[in-house]
Image (tube, helix red, strand yellow):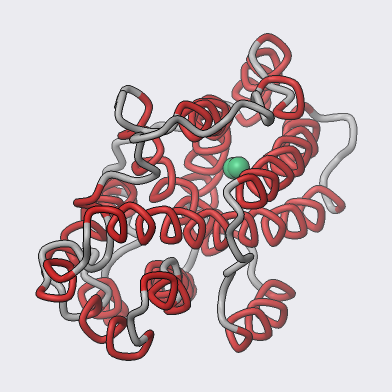
Amino acid sequence: MARVLRPKDREVTAERLLDSSVRNSYQPDLDVDWDAPLVAGKIFLPEERVSLYGTELWERLTPEERIELAKHEIGSITSVGLWTEILLMQLLARYASDLDPRNPHTHYALTEIGDETRHAIMFGKGIARLGLPAYGPPRIVRKLAKLFGAVIDGPAMFASVLVVEETTDRLQRSMLDNDDVQPFIRMINRIHVVEEARHVRYAREELVRGLESLSRPMLELHRLVTAVVAYTIVDIMVNPGVYTAVGLDPRQAREVARDNPHHHETKRWMAEKIVEFLGEVGMIGGPSKRFWRKAHLL
Ligand SMILES: [Fe+2]
Ligand SMILES: [Fe+2]
């Protein structure tokens, strides 16, 4: 299979990533101005990214309610992201426990756990700063993820991690230079984008290496697992509880969002880069491709 990404030697990549981590990492406790007041009139999430944008329900909201809903939606996306980072720390810790502790590749896995620890705290503080509930994923997803996290590894693990990291990254990157967005949210996004770029590199290369030795039936299994993770992740990003913040019925609003072509487009846009990559390396294909379509990611 022709592959666009030709991974370098594992240890060469890891040494570069470690070097970059030393030169360019953040301490969110100090690097984010947690006490700065929110800026009046600035937004939390561009309105075209809100799940109800363009619907009749959206038209009925006042400008203030739209900003409020956007704030709750970014809070929900952040809380789901934070939860996945904690899962990722567990996966990486298990992964690293079987590696040679003398190797840079192992050291980078451990460095990434450190990054994700700081990110999870940063996101948690951000949610608290905005006075938002800790939405997170539904209970059933939390439970299943515990079981699932105990067995997932190899290409499915790295591909699942990439789906989460790269979809969030697309959204955060798009806000970096947007002057209308609250400065403190932009700073959080900036820190995350810089450090995640290394995680993406690490996982993309390791995924390609892992695929080289995979048999056909195992490839289908890893594809299926990744497709189910992708389907679930984009489905749970907006917790229906956000709609009650602006007086909407959560069930009804969730149905409207699920049928909203603008929302489908946002999901597709967020996943565009990772879908392209996973397609190129052969991780999207076969029977499980229908999950990607059903999730509006293809
Ligand atoms: Fe992160
Ligand atoms: Fe990450």
Quadrant where the image shows the C terminus? bottom left
Ligand 1 quadrant? top right
Identify the residue at image location x=49%, y=35%.
Answer: 185
Identify the residue at image location x=47%, y=58%.
Answer: 77
- Decide: is 241 above or below 94: below
- Judge whether residue 228 can be spotted in this image: no
- Decide: is 227 above or below 47: below
Q: Could you tell me residue 231's position as x and y percent?
A: 37, 74
Q: In this view, does 181 lie to the left or right of 135?
A: left
For residue 5, what is the image quadrant? top left
58 or 116: nearer the eye?
58
Identify the residue at image location x=15%, y=73%.
Answer: 260
- Decide: is 172 above or below 96: above
Q: Could you tell me residue 238's position as x and y percent?
A: 41, 69
Q: Residue furthest top?
A: 23
129 or 102: nearer the eye?
129
Identify the residue at image location x=57%, y=69%.
Answer: 135
197 or 31: nearer the eye?
31
Q: Is residue 197 left or right of residue 47?
A: right
For residue 111, what is the image quadrant? top right
Q: Could you tell me residue 192's position as x and y percent?
A: 55, 33
Tell me how many marks there are: 0
Q: Is residue 120 left or right of residue 157?
A: right
- Judge whether residue 269 can be spotted in this image: yes
Q: Could you tell me residue 278's position as x and y percent?
A: 34, 53
267 or 177: nearer the eye?
177
